[in-house]
Structures are given as C-alpha cells and as structure tokens.
Amino acid sequence: MDIGQGQPHRVLELWFEDANVIFQAESSLFRVHKGILQARSSVFRDMFAIPQTSTPLDSDLMDGCIVTQLPDAAEDIRCFFLAIGYDASFFEPPPTPTPLSVVLAIARMSHKYDVPFLRRRALSHLSHRCPTTLRDFFTVHVEGKNSFLGEEFEVLRAALKIDPSWVLPYQFLITHFTELETLLATQQWKDLEVEIQAMCHVKWRCIESHSRRCIAQLLSKLLSDLCATCAALSVQIQRAAVGCLSEDIPMFLSPGIIKGTTGCCPECLLGTYKTFADAYGSFWDALPETLGMPRWDILETKKSEDTEPIALWLKNTRWVVRVSTSYK
Ligand SMILES: [Zn+2]
C-alpha cells in the first residue's frame, strides 16, 4: 500500500479500535466512525454511498479497513474530527477563547465537507475578530491589538476560500495600516499566492484613494467651519493634513490633523470633533463599495445567516480582540 511520503502514524486521540473507516491526511492516520461522519457531513454521506465496484486488495487494507486518502493538512483534519463529535469541549462557541489556527482549520474543513453547525461556529468566532460596524471597529482597536500580518493573511486566505464576504472589508482595510512599500517587503506578503497578492494590491490602492478623498473632504469642511479668529490656524491645519497624506497614513490613524486643530476656540474644537466623527462615518460606510463589494447592510444580513444566534447578543457585549497597528 502506497500511503504517501513520511512514515504513517496513528493519531491516538482519533484512533478507535471499534471504528470502521481509516483516513490518511499527510502521514497521519485516523480511525473513526462512519456513522458519525455520515450524520454530520453531506460530503462524507455521499462518499460512503458510492458502491464499492471491486473487492479491495489486501494491500489496500489496514486492520480490515480501507484507507482513504484525504488531500487536506493533517492538523486541519485532526481539529475537524475532534470538533465534529469526538471531543465536545474542543471547539466551544464564542466567547470561549480559541486559537485562530483552530478556528481557521475548522472553518476550512466544515465548509469543504459541508458541516453547517461547525461552519457557523467557526464564523461566529471570526465575526468578533472582523468588525462590520464602525462601533465594533473602534472597540477592536481601542482594546489594543497584537496580531500579526501573517495571521491577518491567513484569515483573508480562508475567507476567500469559504466565502464569508463580510470578513473581507476589514481584512483588506487592515493591510492598509501598513505602508505599501513596507507591506510588499514583508515575508508574509511574499508567502501569499500570486492571485491574492494581486487582489490585495488593488484593494490597498482602492482604500488609499478612498482615504485621500475622505481626508480632502474632511479638510475642506474643517476649514470652512472655522470662526474668523480660528481661521488664522487654517495654514497649520492644512500643513498637518498634507503631512498625513504624504506619509500614507490611513485616515483612522491620523492624529496629525487633530493636532493642527488644538489651538481652536472651544466651539470650533467641538465642531472639529463632529466633523471627524462624520468623516469616519463616511469613510466606513462607503468602504465595501470602494472595494467593489455589496453594502454593509447586505453584508450584515449575510453575517447573521452565517453565524450562530448567540453571536447576535455577544455582538453587544464588550469583546477583547487583539489588534496591532504596526507590522514593522
Ligand atoms: Zn473658533
């Protein structure tokens, strides 16, 4: 029996002597119960329904079971089988903290093998990481983030494969937190598939144009709203804004313009806060369409279909997500 490269070994936590099917992923062997997989996955159900056309050779058997090769990563299959019914505590719904690698493995496998309850659970975990409202966006960032570009690209890669479109605007936005030149020089970028690189590059530029448009509108509004006394600060404000633009810093992270307004009278200062809030709102509201995607309300509907009902009330609770603004 040719069972691929590497010395095949049994994964003991997923090897049951009374079980009736053996799967091999990479060099890992899993002996599990056909009935459990059939009950939860339409893909396995269809796979097992295909009648055996010939008697298997002894060389194709292990302990009397046919060994079926799976093209997936062994770790993905391990997480998937544990979550599908072999360890009830392995993949709890949010807010139970769960490693991102486990969430993504189960998201990929549950989508591929059609296990809706696991897909919903995995996407519920992702939903807290990928905000779809401006309020959640600020919550995510105010909590202080510590993630890595490689992780963000892993989420993006998985999202493109399993199609929860509501994940994408935030994932593209987060790549824009790094200057393009720096981004292209990272190893994480070089490790991306060429087609994902091309897509990210285009989206980065879309966000850049959108960001510049919003900053220009913000600046024009700020200057036109100043009282006669504060109008003397307009050069200072303009200089701060131009500085932000030339540094390629996205609007959300541009304290420079705010600094330019610190000498304003209380009324104008209050006005600038409102102008900033409106500008953030405009930036966020138009973000999906800027990226060539459906509007937020359509994405939000899709998100509620994709996630567990529990995610709806958790949405309104305080949620700690690790966010970083620098990958340098
Ligand atoms: Zn004033």
Image (cartoon, rainbow, N blue to C red):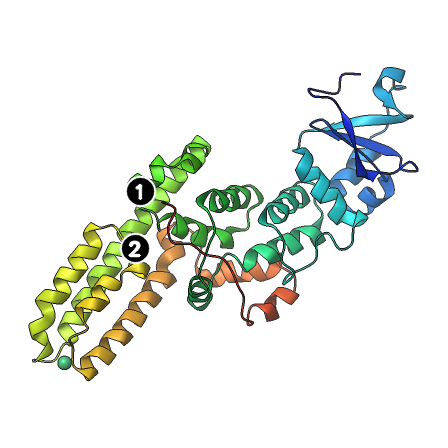
Residue at image point 58% right, 62% down: 304
Is 137 placed above or below 149 here? below
Disc 2 crowd rating (10 Å Cα; few below 14, some 14-19, many 20+) is many
Q: Is residue 220 above or below residue 162?
A: below
Where on the image, by quarter, is ligand 1?
bottom left
Dividing the image into 4 quarters, which one contains the N terminus? top right
> Which of disc 1 and disc 2 is earlier in sequence?
1
Picture coordinates of residue 139 (x, y %)?
Answer: 46, 66
* Residue 241, quarter of picture: bottom left
Disc 2 marks a residue whose amino acid type is Pro
For disc 1, the marked residue is: 180
Is the residue marked 1 within 8 Å of ligand 1, measured from its CB? no
Q: CA distance from mark 2 to mark 1?
A: 11 Å
The label on residue 165 is none
Q: Residue at x 39, y 52 (%)?
A: 173
Visible in this render: residue 57?
A: no
Residue 308, given in percent of the width and then of the height, sits at 65, 61
Residue 119: where, in percent of width, then height? 66, 51
**x, y (%) of residue 192?**
45, 34
* Residue appearing at x 22%, y 62% in the figure: 256
Q: Can residue 229 be seen by looking at this rendering?
A: yes
Query: Toward the viewer: 292 or 316?
Result: 316
| The image quarter in which residue 29 lies | top right
Horizontal side, residue 150 vs residue 50: left or right: left
Q: Is residue 15 left or right of residue 7?
A: right
- Residue labelled with disc 2: 250
User: Is 227 located above or below residue 171 in the figure?
Assistant: below
Q: Secondary structure at mark 2?
A: loop
Which is more toward the observer, 47 or 98?
Answer: 98
